[in-house]
């Protein structure tokens, strides 16, 4: 849109502190470069939030592994074998989910251009399975 009067009017309204979705839309038409920058910022924000959710999903599973491990240690050597076996089975099930979540995080990172996953080994180690 190449209407100089509209551009001046919109600039004046912004300086006046007017907020309106219509003002925003018209400004985007008057200044398409700004609109593209806004969209890019929004896309980057969404990408970062989605990556954060992927990491959070993995950390939830790893937390569950820590909780189960703590409960297994608390049982002691004379614990009921069925109770121990049940906890170990839960541990292994969460471990498998953690492995899947870790893979999903790696795929997500690769989609965003992060090819080096060495830090994940340090930040999010997956413990070995329990023997049953």
Image (cartoon, rainbow, N blue to C red):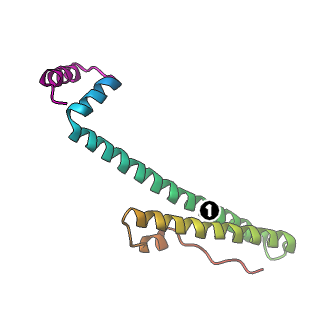
Q: Quick check: 50 above or below 131?
A: above
Q: Is residue 108 visible?
A: yes
Please provide percent x and percent y for residue 124.
52, 68
Q: Is residue 47 left or right of 82 when viewed as pictured? A: left
Q: Residue 34: where, in percent of width, then height?
A: 23, 39
> Which quadrant of the view contains residue 37?
top left
The residue pinned by badge 1 equals 61
Report x, y in % for residue 74: 75, 67
Name the residue: 51% across, 54% down. 53
- Quadrant placement of the N terminus: top left
Q: Is residue 114 magenta?
A: no
Q: Is residue 50 left or right of residue 62?
A: left
Whole-percent x, y for residue 129 in the image: 67, 77
**Quadrant position of the C terminus in the picture:** bottom right
Q: Residue at the location (24% across, 29% down)?
A: 27
Numbered range of the magenta stretch: 1-20
For mark 1, does the 10 Å Cα neighbourhood hold few (<14), some (14 to 19), or many (20 or more) residues?
many
> 64 or 30, which is in the foreground?
30
At horizontal 53% and vertical 56% (from top left) the residue drawn is: 56
Q: Is residue 5 left or right of residue 130?
A: left
């Amino acid at each position: 849109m190449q209407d100089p009067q509209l551009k001046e009017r919109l600039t004046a309204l912004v300086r006046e502190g007017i907020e309106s979705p219509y003002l925003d839309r018209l400004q985007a038409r008057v200044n398409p470069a700004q609109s593209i920058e806004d969209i890019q910022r929004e896309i980057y924000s969404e990408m970062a939030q989605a990556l954060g959710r992927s990491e959070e999903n993995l950390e939830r599973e790893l937390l569950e592994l820590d909780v189960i491990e703590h409960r297994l240690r608390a049982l002691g050597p004379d614990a009921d074998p069925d109770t121990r076996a049940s906890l170990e089975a839960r541990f292994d099930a969460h471990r498998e989910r953690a492995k899947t979540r870790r893979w999903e995080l790696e795929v997500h990172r690769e989609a965003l251009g992060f090819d080096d996953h060495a830090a994940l080994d340090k930040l999010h180690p997956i413990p070995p399975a329990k023997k049953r």
